[in-house]
Image: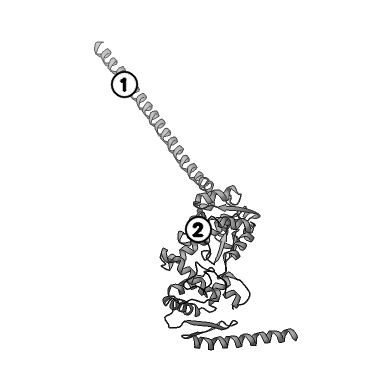
Amino acid sequence: MTDLFEAEVTTTTSLDMRRLQRQKRRAARRRWTLVVAAVALVLVAIGGSIAWNFVKSFESAESNVAADYETAGQGLVQVVVEQGDTGADIAQTLYDAGVVASTEAFITEARNNPESASITPGYYYMQREMKAEYALLTLLDPNSRNELSLTIPEGKTVDDYYQRIANLTNASLEEVQAVAENPEALGLPEEADGNLEGWLFPSTYRFNPDVQPADILAEMIEQTITVLDRNGVAEEDREDVLTIASIIERESRLEEDRPMVSGVIHNRLDIDMRLEMDSTVKYLSPSDGVYTSDEERAIDSPYNTYLYAGLPPGPIAAPGEASIKAAIAPAEHDYLFFVTVNTDTGETLYAETFDEHQKNVIIGQEWAREKAAEAEDEITD
């Protein structure tokens, strides 16, 4: 009985053990199934996230494209590029004025165009709602500038220039003259001794529409200094060079005559001979014609080079750079006289002696008489 029981007991225990093992295996399989399912869910989630982000990247890229208009614009607007403005400053100005749809669009265009560095300060006429590319091209087009132009011819006096400045700025002549009476504020060098004559460089200038007479005068003086420095004129020689150059400007008709006339002036100065230039007398008495009368040549003034030796006290007109160059580098010759014998062509004859000069003067007088006779015949016809 005992052995059987023992055998029976042994059998019952073995069955229980096998049952327990099966249950453990089923539990393990369930756990692995759950793990695999969980991993699969994670992988699906990750894959979905990657796919979603991939799709969203297109939307993000699209949203990062700067807003821009597609047309050349409509409606007129004026924008101002200030001195010292950066590219970002200009972009903001255009955006605030309604010219471009975003600052980013303009900055992108500017970075892609090397010429954008040449945008200059000033006032510009532009359109509203312009494509950034067109806005940039407009700023690079000089014809888009809203500016005033002032042309100063060579050989004129300050009175002529003051009137031109008044006309340009809508100021009165008296207001311009009042500004000129403060030469130190305009940057006039000390060697000019307060006299602007000859220091207003003849050229074509462009200004913003709000320019003032003082700004114009200051720029013209600055340009004269620039030209003198460019030609190596020392500060202590500036006034004399401008004075000689102004006489050359008034006496020469042809480019080849400038150094020749300069040579005559220097030759006379070297021997302390009076210059006897009609142009200096005309500065005192601005009458018609190129020749002076006996009465005019008798005017007592240091500007009258028929009466006083040496240079006049200062320039008699505004010389251009060609005359300044001639004053610095006169032609080397022995002539002491010259006379223009044909004022239509500018033909000028030179002489070393007074007798030779007189012969040339007669040639000029004969031409003048013939010219007068032709004019009289035209009137009678």
User: Callout 1: few (<14), some (14-19), or many (20+) C-alpha neighbours within 10 Å?
Assistant: few
The kind of residue tagged 2 is Ser
- Which quadrant, please, contains the C terminus? bottom right
**Residue 365 appears at what percent x and percent y?**
60, 86
- In-image side of 372 versus 132 (left or right): right
**Residue sticking out furthest to the right:** 381
**Residue 133 appears at what percent x and percent y?**
56, 57
**Residue 375 appears at what percent x and percent y?**
69, 84
Kindly identify the residue that appears in the image at 56 percent across and 73 percent down. Answer: 281
In the image, residue 223 sits, relative to residue 325, either above or below, namely above
The colouring scheme, among rainbow, by chain, secondary structure or one colour, is one colour
Check disc 1 and report the residue beneath it: 17
Q: Which mark is residue 116?
A: 2
- Which quadrant, please, contains the N terminus? top left
Label 1 sits on a secondary structure element that is helix
The kind of residue tagged 1 is Met
**Residue 233 appears at what percent x and percent y?**
42, 67
Kindly identify the residue that appears in the image at 57 percent across and 88 percent down. Answer: 362
What is the CA distance from the residue labelled 1 to the residue labelled 2? Answer: 90 Å
In the image, residue 68 sits, relative to residue 142, either above or below, namely above
Task: Give 38 or 130, whichever is nearer the viewer.
Answer: 130
Task: Give 322 or 138, whichever is nearer the viewer.
Answer: 322
Q: Which mark is residue 230?
A: none
Task: Give 69 or 268, whichever is nearer the viewer.
Answer: 268
**Residue sticking out furthest to the top:** 1
Q: Is residue 16 visible?
A: yes
Q: Is residue 135 visible?
A: no
**Residue sticking out furthest to the left:** 3
Label 2 sits on a secondary structure element that is helix
Q: Earlier in the sequence, mark 1 or mark 2?
A: 1
Dividing the picture into quadrants, the one containing residue 159 is bottom right
Kindly identify the residue that appears in the image at 46 percent across and 74 percent down. Answer: 326
